[in-house]
Amino acid sequence: MLLTELFPADKGATLRGEAEVTLVMAGRSVSMPGAVLLGGSGTFRIDLLDPLDRPAAIIFAEGKRIIQYRPSAREAAALAALPAACRALAPDGWVPFVLGSAPSGEEGFEAVSWFGRDSLVRYERGAVAVKVEYRGQDGGSVPTRVNWYCGDEIAMRLRYDDGEAGGSRRFTVEYPLARLKVKVGLGESETGIPLPDALFHPRLPAGTRWTGWDLVGEGQGGME
C-alpha cells in the first residue's frame, strides 16, 4: 500500500538530536545550533543554544499555540500560528510525518496527479484537508511535501528537503499565513528512545512574563 511505503515507521517513534536550526518570523531570520526532540505522540521541542550550549530559547507546542520561552529573560510568547477556524489542525501535527509514522491507515486518501505531481489527498466536507506529494526514487516512492489546508489556503506545510520520511536529515516546517518558518538540519541523533512527556511541556518558572501574538490576524501576508 502506497501510504505504508511512504510512511513505514512504527507508531510511537521518537527522535533526539543535535541540529542547525533557522527560525524565520515576519521576514527576520536567525540561525543557531540547537537540540531537537520529537515525540511519538506528535509533540516537539526545539532548544536554540548559545555559545556555551545553554538554551537561549525553548520552542514547543501547547494546545493550539507555539510557545517561545527565553530563560535568561524569563519571558514567554504564545504564538497563534494557525487560524482559529482550523479547529482540527494542531501546530505540532507535522511531527509524525517527519518520523515517518503518519498518517494512520489509508482510509479517506485518494491518489491524484496535479500538473505532473503525484499526490495522496484526503478530503473533509468536500474540500482538501491534507495533501501528501511524493515522487519515485530507487524503484519506490518517497514523500516530498505535506500540505495542511484551512479552507482554500495552506495553513501548515512540511517539506522534506532531502526526501526521506522517517530518515530525513533536513526538513522545513512552515506556517505560511503566520509568515513563520523553521528549518532543521539534523546532525548526530538517535531514534526510538523513551522521551518523558514532561520534556515536551516544560513548567516555566514562577514570575515568567507572558505576551501573546496572533500571527495570522488581519494584515498578515502569505509566505513565499
Image (cartoon, rainbow, N blue to C red):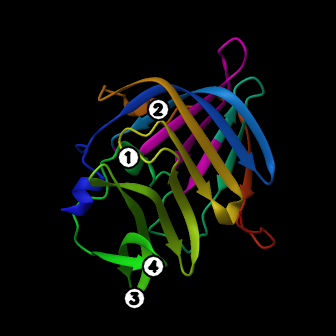
Q: Nearer the viewer, residue 44 or 152?
A: 152
Side (left or right) of 54 relative to 85: right
> Which of the two discs, 1 and 2, labels the residue nearer the N terminus?
2
Task: Name the amino acid, label 1.
Answer: Ala
Give the percent coordinates (x, y) of residue 64: 54, 57
Give the percent coordinates (x, y) of residue 157: 54, 60
Using the numbered discs, state the Cα–Cα distance from disc 1 to disc 4 in whole angstroms. 22 Å
Task: Reply yes or no: does residue 7 show up in magenta.
Answer: no
Label the magenta part by its dominant secondary structure.
strand
Side (left or right) of 132 relative to 81: left
Q: Secondary structure at mark 2?
A: strand
Q: Secondary structure at mark 1?
A: loop
Tell me which residue sits at (45%, 79%) in the image.
Answer: 114
Which disc number belongs to residue 165? Answer: 1
Examine the rendered structure and indicate whether residue 186 appears above or below residue 222.
above
The residue segment tinted magenta is 41-67
Q: Residues within 10 Å of mark 1 (few under 14, many from 20)?
A: many
Task: Name the amino acid, label 2.
Answer: Leu
Using the numbered discs, state the Cα–Cα distance from disc 2 to disc 3 in whole angstroms. 35 Å
Task: Name the amino acid, label 4.
Answer: Trp
Examine the rendered structure and indicate whether residue 201 appears above or below residue 194.
below
Report which residue position mark 2 lands on. Answer: 37
Using the numbered discs, state the Cα–Cα distance from disc 3 to disc 4 in whole angstroms. 17 Å
Q: Nearer the viewer, residue 93 or 186?
A: 186
> Which of the two discs, 1 and 4, labels the residue nearer the N terminus?
4
Q: Residue reaching furthest top?
A: 52
Using the numbered discs, state the Cα–Cα distance from disc 1 to disc 2 in whole angstroms. 16 Å
Report which residue position mark 4 lands on. Answer: 114
> Which of the two discs, 3 and 4, labels the residue nearer the N terminus?
4
Report which residue position mark 3 lands on. Answer: 126
Q: Nearer the viewer, residue 8 or 142?
A: 142
